Image (cartoon, rainbow, N blue to C red):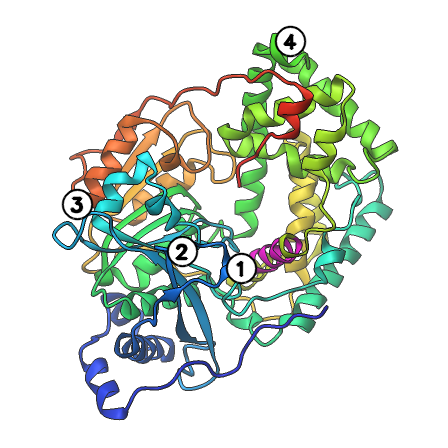
Amino acid sequence: MRRTAALGAAGTLVTGTLLAGAIAATPASAGERQHGASAEARGVRTAAARAAAQGIDWQDCPADWGLKTPIQCGYVTVPVDYAKPNGRTIKIAVDRARNTGGAKQRQGSLLYNPGGPGGSGMRFPTRSTGQSALWKKTAAAYDFVGFDPRGVGHSAPISCVDPQEYVKAPKADPVPDSEADKRAQRKLAKEYADGCGERSGGLLPHMTTPNTARDLDVIRAALGEKKLNYLGVSYGTYLGAVYATLFPDHVRRMLVDSVVNPSREKVWYQANLDQDVAFETRWGDWKKWVAKNDATYHIGDTPQKVQAQWEKLRAAAKKKPIGGLVGPAELTGFFQNAPYYDSSWAPVAQVWSAYLAGDEKPLVEKAGPDLKDTAGNIASENGNAVYTAVECTDAKWPANWKKWDRDNTRVHAKAPFMTWSNAWLNLPCATWPAKQHTPVDVKTGKGLPSVLIVQSTRDAATPYAGAVELHKRLKGSRLITERDAGSHGVTGQVNPCINDRVDAYFLHGTTDAKDVTCAPHATPEPAKATAKSASGAQTAS
């Protein structure tokens, strides 16, 4: 089924008199003045004024969105192209849970982006309604607001390939054995890029982080907030950094967690090579943990033995895909959950242990696609399409295959776990059918308050150097470092040294006088591997 972005006009424009008054009440931000009165800057002011006048028509969420009352849903209309605010528009899906502490405690709305690019923030309000212990105090003070960024989910979703084709398995081994293997992967990447242009070409040129940051400012205005309270994780940190640069005096409080390096030299080609090295480091941490708990998992009692078992598993899956669905590519996709998240250490080890004990069902269920899950497959394909579109459109990528080959061959030699897999994922950017831009020069603008940065030193997905770089660029920011830890998404971990400071920042706007280093959160406990527990193991998402 062919799916294209919904690019028709959406929403009703307010009257000229009301609109003029709203624009007058929305002066250009310091970032806009700093970057000149560009057409995009003027377009944001126009769109924000309209949104402020219209507000959001909050309703019970559609039943198939899986968001129950008291969470409410609505839409905010934004331009496809901010240089043409009176042109085509799309609707951005938003949802909220009202603050739990009543009117006296309310400090406004807290907007959230979980990363990606391509991640949906629509589950964020459930942290409030579910009374998550980590977020209970913040939920008392803020409406928790989530949104699907442009191109994602319910916000004019884009697509690059038929979802059922996207999830077909097994895929080719990402580690090439020959030049013929590389040519085959290059062909697939080119076809994927072409598919993005064919299926989503109308929105593709506008799928950038700066445009999503502009959408964020329009959402702020629609919520009736003069200033933004924001929590961004992973790619959400880069979105926050770009917003802080473009709209510094529109920020009230901003916390960024697990930071993408904002340097123009890193976004996005070099950032992915750096990520490969960091994943190898965290893969090593997990192997040590598995070896330490060999009495539970029986995989190997040294990291070297665990690695040997991994290579044996890959070889067996390459020769004969496990369950007919799980080859080396699918194994890498599943096992990379362990370097990503501590919460996946035990579940991934359980599944592997069960396989070695003769039960392959958990591994097939977890690593292989569910071809019958139509909604899930659509969401998976959409997420990858947005990831590719944003990264490829945000920045200029090398077009010369020799550079890709040389760089990834070099990195693979020291970081073989996922280097080639990551390379093929990003290779569509080499033949991208839309204009590639120059990334925003992230830096402090007039009026930007202290931004709180939280980062673990051994994060695989967003290496620690990214937090250091952002800290340098945002004057007055504070950096909380979790040493000797590597889970992606630090604020989701139980660590009072961090949790208490997050509460203090959002509730009172306070930060430490100096940067802080915290001890690591607790190391995951092993869970005994049984066929039943392995089959029910859940990995982080």
Q: Which mark is residue 441?
A: none
Secondary structure under the numbered disc 2 in the rendered image: helix
Image position, residue 57 (x, y; %)? 34, 72
The earlier-in-sequence mark between 3 and 1 is: 1
Residue 175 drawn above or below residue 156 = above
Residue depth check, mark 4 versus mark 1: number of the one nearer the observer:
1
Residue depth check, mark 3 versus mark 1: number of the one nearer the observer:
1
Q: Quadrant of the N terminus?
A: bottom right
Compare residues 420 and 333 and report the one nearer the observer.
333
Residue depth check, mark 4 versus mark 2: number of the one nearer the observer:
4
Q: Residue furthest left?
A: 104
Quarter-wise, where is residue 306 in the image?
top right
Crowding at mark 4 (Cα within 10 Å: few <14, some 14-19, many 20+): some
Residue identified by numbered label 4: 301
Residue identified by numbered label 3: 509
Which residue occupies 51% across, 62% down? 394
Which residue occupies 58% across, 11% down? 293
Identify the magenta region. 377-387
Compare residues 197 and 441 and report the one nearer the observer.
197
Cβ atoms at labels 1 and 2 below 8 Å apart: no
Label 4 to label 2: alpha-carbon separation: 42 Å
> What kind of secondary structure does the magenta stretch mostly adopt?
helix
Secondary structure under the numbered disc 1 in the rendered image: helix
Cβ atoms at labels 4 and 1 below 8 Å apart: no
> Identity of the amino acid at label 1?
Asp
The earlier-in-sequence mark between 4 and 1 is: 1
Residue identified by numbered label 2: 239
> Identity of the amino acid at label 4?
Asp
Which residue occupies 50% across, 53% down? 119
